[in-house]
Image: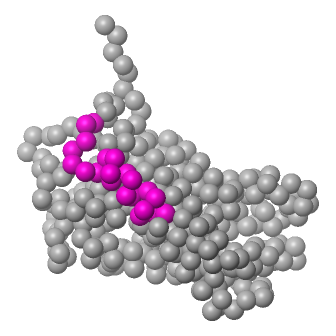
Amino acid sequence: MATTPPVNGFSPQEIARLTARAAVAKSHLSWTELSVKAFMGGFFISLGALVDLVIISGCPGLRESNPALATMIAGFTFPLGFVMITLTNMELATSNMFVMPFAALQRRVTLWHLAKNWGVSYIFNLAGALFTAGFLAWWSDVLSTDVQSAYAVTQAQGRVNVAWSVNFLRGVGCNFFVAMAFFLSLGAADFVSKVYCIWIPVWAFVMAGYQHSIANYFSVPIGMFYGTDFDVGRFIYQSVIPVTLGNIVGGVLVAALPFWILYGRGDAVNVQTGQPVGEKKKNEPRLDSDDETLRPGETSPGRRSRERYDRDGMADAA
């Protein structure tokens, strides 16, 4: 009797377990580790946005004749930042808006750990994005032509000078795609497959014109450096607030909640994939045991908990 060959990946039920494991690992990070990882996350995602901007600002003829094609070509480079974040195991606030609520609904992490992760990762993502905009884009004169600098202003104004509700909904759509990129990447068993799983959803939200709150801390300030028609206050009210709230809604209500209902309530039946994630080693504690659930006030998880954030843990949760 013929047997079905193993699938090169994990089932949704197994990915849900890996997502919860990733959230617990994130909760084990110290303040210093989380801060540095978040700064690098903002730095990396801004590098992708910078390459995207260099390409689309440098082809004014194509933007005029076929703007959709120009957006598609330039947007293809944007996921570079997400790939670097995932494969180097850095922190991104928007993906954490999916991961941490998913585990919190399972009571695997507390609301304190969720708030700590969101707050620190958001602030230091912002710092990394501003660093890229100020030092590696504006001061280094990457947008060296008048056409490129003019488009930097145009695209920044297009992100801010729109209705509040529009930016909110664009934030919702964006973070659903980001959550899917994270979830799908966990289902891949090798780095090449992870790159594909990240690239397509992120490329899709760029082509759709959705708004990413962290990437906007690069895209809008770089335009402001060259002279926009709005000030910082308008940027915060018209872009930062609605896009961030939209990202939270997209990550929590549109992604984490449905996936928790489907795959996060108790031990779902695993689909056999041939991957070792569902196997139990002798004397190894259960993944969903109380030992793996952080309690309020737990700040020093100890060596056993930290070992889950080693190379093997990264291979599963990258």
Residue plotted at (88% across, 64% down) = 60
In this view, 220 is above or below 10: below
Q: Which of 188 and 175 is in front in this view?
A: 175
> In the displayed structure, does residue 249 sit left or right of residue 224?
left
Q: Which residue lies furthest to the left in this view?
A: 283
Task: Give how far across and how far down residue 123 sits, in percent.
Answer: 46, 81
Task: Give how far across and how far down residue 198 sits, in percent.
Answer: 53, 51
In this view, 312 is above or below 132: above
Task: Give how far across and how far down residue 25 sits, in percent.
Answer: 28, 62
Which residues fall within the magenta stretch?
250-270
Chief secondary structure of the magenta span? Answer: helix
> In the displayed structure, does residue 39 sit left or right of residue 164?
left
In this view, 232 is above or below 199: below
Q: Which of 62 and 260 is in front in this view?
A: 260
- The quarter of the rendered structure image containing the N terminus is top left
> In the displayed structure, does residue 256 sit left or right of residue 220?
left
**Is residue 279 visible in the rendered structure shown here?**
yes
Q: How many numbered dots are placed on residues in this image?
A: 0
Task: Give how far across and how far down residue 14 sits, in percent.
Answer: 31, 42
Q: Which of 295 and 121 is in front in this view?
A: 295
Q: Based on the displayed image, in which of its 4 quarters is residue 31 positioned?
A: bottom left
